[in-house]
Image: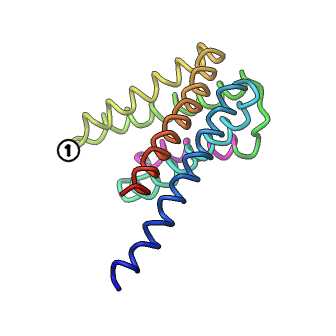
Amino acid sequence: MAAADSRPSGSSSWALLLGLGVVAVILGLVVVSNIWESLRFLAIMAGLVLLFAGVVGVAVNVRRGAGAALGPVVALVGGLVLLFWPDLTLKALAVIVGLTFIAWGAIQAGVAFTRPGEGRSGTLLGGVLILLLGVVVVAWPGPTLALLTTLVGLALVAAGIAAVVQALALRRG
């Protein structure tokens, strides 16, 4: 009886994975085939990522003091701006994302200098990398966002293909 109970579950899981894979491939191809029209999608996705990073960062750092939570608050604000204003021009999207990264990275690096102890070097390195990424996005908005959009689309296609392959393997097994 236990084998019969697990079979429908396995059967439905491979089909669900197959469906997810097909949807991911289609969405990825749509994004890659129409990069510039996908900027609205990119703005919404970037907004959601910044919002999530901000909420989690505030929750994690609130006990460490206002300085440690300030960087994630900047990310949260940047995410909200992108979510409430998704029909941005390429330059406006790059400036908002870039300035958010610059401010967030600078605050995080500053916090690393003022807070000695464990994790200081990781916090400093993370802050500097986020800051540098912000500078790159502001300095080269078109190529950076086009590359990012293309990579998101290709990642969706690759993840979709992997899900389809895994689903077919589950079905055979």
Of residue 145 and residue 118, the one placed in the foreground of this image is 145
Q: Residue at x 55, y 44 (%)?
A: 49
Q: Point out residue 33 in the picture as x, y percentages from the top left corner.
A: 69, 25
Please, is residue 74 above or below residue 126 in the view? below
What residue occupies the far left of the structure in this picture? 118
Amino acid beneath label 1: Glu
Query: Could you say where residue 56 lies in the image, as x and y percent from the top left?
Result: 46, 54
Q: Main structural element of the magenta stretch: helix, strand or loop?
A: helix
Q: Tell me where residue 125 appears, x and y as whole percent.
A: 32, 30
Residue 132 magenta:
no
Across and down, in percent, residue 76 comes to 58, 47
What colour scheme was applied to this rendering of the protein? Answer: rainbow
* Residue 57 visible (yes or no): no
Residue 140 seen in this snapshot: yes
In what element is the residue under mark 1? loop
Left or right, residue 154 beside residue 125: right
Question: Which of the two residues, 23 or 62, is positioned nearer the viewer here?
Answer: 23
| Image quadrant in which you'd find residue 43 | top right
- Magenta residues, as a range? 67-82
What quarter of the picture does the N terminus occupy? bottom left
Crowd around label 1: few <14 · some 14–19 · many ≥20 (10 Å): few
Quarter of the image with the C terminus is bottom left
Q: Residue at x 37, y 32 (%)?
A: 109
Query: Dot 1 corresponds to which residue?
Result: 118
Q: Eyeballing the image, is 63 above or below 139?
A: below
At 65% from the left edge and 39% from the top edge, which residue is drawn?
Answer: 26
Q: Is residue 88 left or right of residue 74?
A: right
Closer to the camera in the image, 76 or 159: 159
Residue farthest to the bottom, as pictured: 1
Q: Is residue 51 left or right of residue 118?
A: right
